[in-house]
């Protein structure tokens, strides 16, 4: 692989904060497609393979940032990894993950709702809705975001509106007022 894993992200030093889930397919493609894809980052591949652990540093935060990539080909893999991060996160990593949850659902609401129904992504939905709600310090700001997302869903995936409507109360319940 050519790159080194920073000490703070090495599995020997960060047990329990490493991805242990391996699956055969992601979004209809064999996982090997992503693991062997040169467009997927070294740290993403290492995290998937349990060789790169969560830690609040730039190397790890760059992995979370990849979930928001505009590359439609690689984003499903990064989204899968991001869900493992959300599932395992605590402390400072949780705070950063919460921001990325909000940003992802705002940028790709239809994709999120489509992936929500796919077992392979194993979205920790309770944590997602809590994280998104936590990013707001008042109901007005939260409702503004939810309305923006409503508009995107109306245009891009109206068949998923009911599913989205079921998530909104959980997001509102987690507002950090």
Image (cartoon, rainbow, N blue to C red):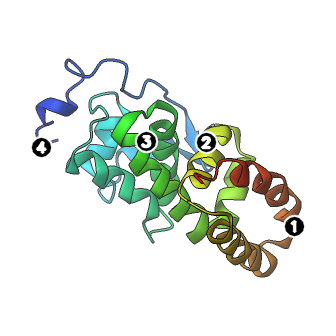
Percent across and percent down for residue 142 are 65, 66
Image quadrant where one finds the N terminus = top left
Answer above or below: position of 70 versus 171.
below
- Find residue 159 and name its label: 1
Q: Cα distance, mark 1 to mark 3? A: 31 Å
Q: Cα distance, mark 3 to mark 4? A: 26 Å
Q: Earlier in the sequence, mark 1 or mark 3?
A: 3
- Viewer-proximal residue, 57 or 111? 57
Answer above or below: position of 158 versus 65.
below
Q: Earlier in the sequence, mark 3 or mark 2?
A: 3
Q: Earlier in the sequence, mark 2 or mark 1?
A: 2
Residue identifier under label 2: 121
Answer yes or no: do the residues labelled 1 and 4 have beta carbons within 8 Å?
Answer: no
Q: Residues within 10 Å of mark 1 (few under 14, many from 20)?
A: few
In the structure shown, which secondary structural element does the residue marked by tag 4 occupy? Answer: loop
- Viewer-proximal residue, 17 or 27? 17
List the single residue furthest toward the front.
Answer: 177
Q: Residue at x 83, y 63 (%)?
A: 160
Q: Cα distance, mark 1 to mark 4? A: 44 Å
When asked about the image quadrant of residue 108, the answer is bottom right
In the structure shown, which secondary structural element does the residue marked by tag 3 occupy? Answer: helix
Image quadrant where one finds the C terminus = bottom right
Q: Of discs 3 and 4, which sits in the foreground?
A: 3
Residue identifier under label 4: 3
In the structure shown, which secondary structural element does the residue marked by tag 2 occupy? Answer: helix
Q: Residues within 10 Å of mark 4 (few under 14, many from 20)?
A: few
- Find residue 94 and name its label: 3
């Amino acid at each position: 692989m050519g790159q080194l894993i920073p000490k703070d992200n090495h599995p020997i030093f960060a047990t329990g904060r490493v991805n242990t889930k391996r699956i055969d397919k992601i979004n209809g493609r064999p996982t090997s497609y992503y693991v062997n894809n040169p467009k997927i980052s070294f740290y993403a591949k290492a995290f998937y393979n349990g060789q790169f652990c969560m830690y609040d540093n730039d190397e790890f935060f760059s992995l979370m940032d990849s979930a928001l990539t505009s590359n439609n080909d690689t984003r499903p893999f990064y989204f899968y990894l991001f869900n493992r991060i959300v599932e395992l996160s605590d402390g400072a990593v949780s705070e950063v993950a919460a921001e990325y949850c909000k940003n992802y659902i705002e940028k790709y609401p239809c994709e999120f709702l489509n992936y929500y129904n796919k077992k392979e992504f194993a979205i920790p939905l309770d944590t997602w809705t809590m994280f998104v709600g936590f990013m707001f310090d008042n109901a007005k700001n939260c409702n503004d975001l939810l309305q923006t997302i409503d508009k995107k869903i109306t245009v891009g995936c109206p068949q998923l509106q009911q599913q989205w409507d079921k998530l909104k109360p959980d997001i509102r319940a987690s507002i950090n007022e």
